[in-house]
Amino acid sequence: MQQNTSIPIEDPLYSKRNRIRIAVSLFYFCQGLAFSSWASRIPIIKERLHLTEAQLGTILLMLPIGQLVTMALSGKLVTKYGSANVLRITAVIYSIVLCAIGFATNAYQLGAVLFLFGVVGNMCNISVNTQGVAAEKIFQKSIMSSFHGAWSIAGFTGALIGLMTMNIGIDTVQHFFIILVLVCANTISNHKFLVQGKADQSEKKSFFSKPESSLVQLGIIGFFSMATEGAMFDWSGVYFKDIVHAPANFIIVGYASFMVMMATGRFIGDIVISRIGRKKTLQGSGILMFTGMMLSVLMPQFWICTFAFMLVGIGVACNVPTVYSLAGQNKKVPSGVALAMVSSISFLGFLMGPPLIGYIAEILDLRYSYGLFAFFGLLMFVMTSKLKMFRETED
């Protein structure tokens, strides 16, 4: 991993900065493409293996479990061997494991492969985000949001490829093999443009040592954002069906409006951050999250909720990229370890948010669930306002 210093203009890396940015963006894209390709085939795999909803739900937990249990290992590998070395290997392995999913013949095999998919996916996640931090140092400005935008675009692309392959009769294994070929082609073409380097080996901060308070705070902010994001991913369609009472053909509008604005927000996020700074961006994002969620609770009409979900999409767009960028700039902890720490806390929100929504909805009502999650935005605003680290990191 790279040092926490800016790259001088006369440095050779600076002259190649645009090519580096393209390469890193494509690695983000390929990781998103692999994940979305798996997601697009879940109904087919469920039917082929004759899984019930409960069985599928249990099996799907193996993926986030695999991600969580290897957070510390991922940070250590990236710190010891460098994010470029880890990424060029794990990007290919990630797609190989994706292909293995297609060969699963029973629930136990699928669960085991999904666990491995989570393990390798987490290593890709930490290494590619470390590359994003390194690229930001070369550009000497915020560009992390655009990288996550590439991941979001890959989500749409993967879904479209999945739909196309199913409609023309390409089976799951063949579909996933096509993704493997694309990922391998990208790795061969762009791996040499990744930012090389290792962490300063004098930095011996362990993942399990007493964490930096600033990293814990960033992780909690990420937790609030990812919990909201997970709630929108899993429950927006249900909300439009059961609360908004949207026509059957328009239930998808809530999810689509959220996703489109989240992707758009990520591509314009770097411009916003460069003008108003990371602190105000996170504060504004928290207010947008609160306003959108609360508006959908108080006025559950179709067009109002569509607009409300758009606000939530913009609100969550830049949070994780900003939090990861700030974590990577920490001067006391190697970037790989810092990102693993923050990712661990943040990802718990994505894992715990959707079930929490369901439990509250079962006891009370889905509107109460969304009302509670609305206050995550306010809590994010308050925490961001009190963070001292912005005195050192604000542009």
Image: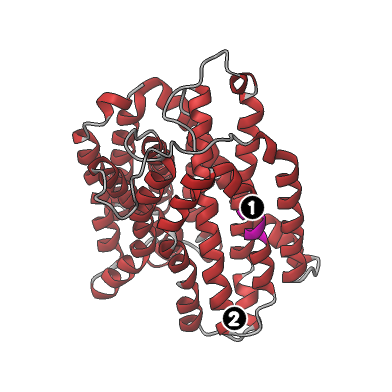
Image coordinates of residue 208 in percent, x first then y, are 31, 55
Residue 98 seen in this snapshot? yes
Q: Amino acid at mark 1?
A: Ile
The residue range painted magenta reads: 90-95
Residue 312 seen in this snapshot? no
Image coordinates of residue 146 in percent, x first then y, are 53, 35
For marks 1 and 2, give the CA distance.
24 Å
Q: How many marks?
A: 2
In the image, residue 15 lies in the stretch drawn in magenta: no
**Mark number for residue 89?**
1
Horizontally, is 2 left or right of 37 in the view? left
Horizontally, is 175 left or right of 320 in the view? right
What residue did someone put label 2 on? 109
Determine whether the residue tagged by mark 2 lies in a helix, strand or loop. Answer: helix
**In the figure, residue 172 lies in which quadrant?**
bottom right
Q: Amino acid at mark 2?
A: Gln
